[in-house]
Image (tube, helix red, strand yellow):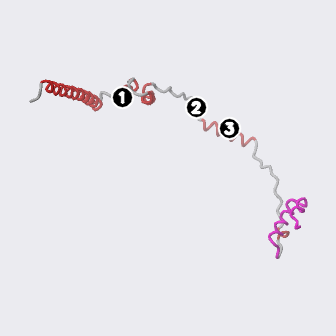
Amino acid sequence: MASKRELEDIVQRQTAALKSQMDRIAELEAEVARLNGVISGDCDALQTLQRIYTDPANPVSVIMKAAGEAVAYERAKPPSVTINAGVSLYDVLERKRLERFQAKPAVIDSKPQPRVPTEEFTMVGATARGAVFALINYRFGSRLENKFARR
């Protein structure tokens, strides 16, 4: 048979286990009540975000993220200002574009490139080097003649 000290030790461990289980049951009941509130519509997304960012037990990063998401629903955006002068912006821009083109017609200001006469480069039996030399000589004149001449 167990001694009185052993029995007191068993009772003390069982009491501690019972207290631990009762605390866990209380936590679970609170969680169930919270979830039932969400299901029944007592708590919406904004209230959830507000609860998260007002809880000091949460990390700063979680608080900042929840506050950032909630601000769009808490503070209204300023109304956009529209001015209607009776004329659309497209009409004004189109009128300006047409006035610009009618006032000064577009002129292409360029000089035509001289055509290369094909008879100078049609050499029967000419090598590729000779054809390149003839083209360079025609294009740049005699100033490059000495650079590409055969040595």
Query: SS at mark 2?
Result: loop
Numbered circle sitting on residue 33: none
Chain part drawn in magenta: 125-151
First in sequence, mark 3 or 1: give its number: 1
Numbered circle sitting on residue 96: 3
Residue type at mark 2 is: Gly
Out of 128 and 29, give the one closest to the viewer.
29
Asked whether disc 3 touches disc 2, contact meaning CB atoms under 8 Å apart, the reply is no
Query: SS at mark 3?
Result: helix
Q: Nearer the viewer, mark 3 or mark 2?
A: 3
The magenta stretch spans residue 138:
yes
Residue type at mark 3 is: Lys
The magenta stretch spans residue 89:
no
Out of 86 and 39, give the one closest to the viewer.
39
Residue 86 point in image, percent of width and height: 58, 31
Residue 141 point in image, percent of width and height: 89, 60
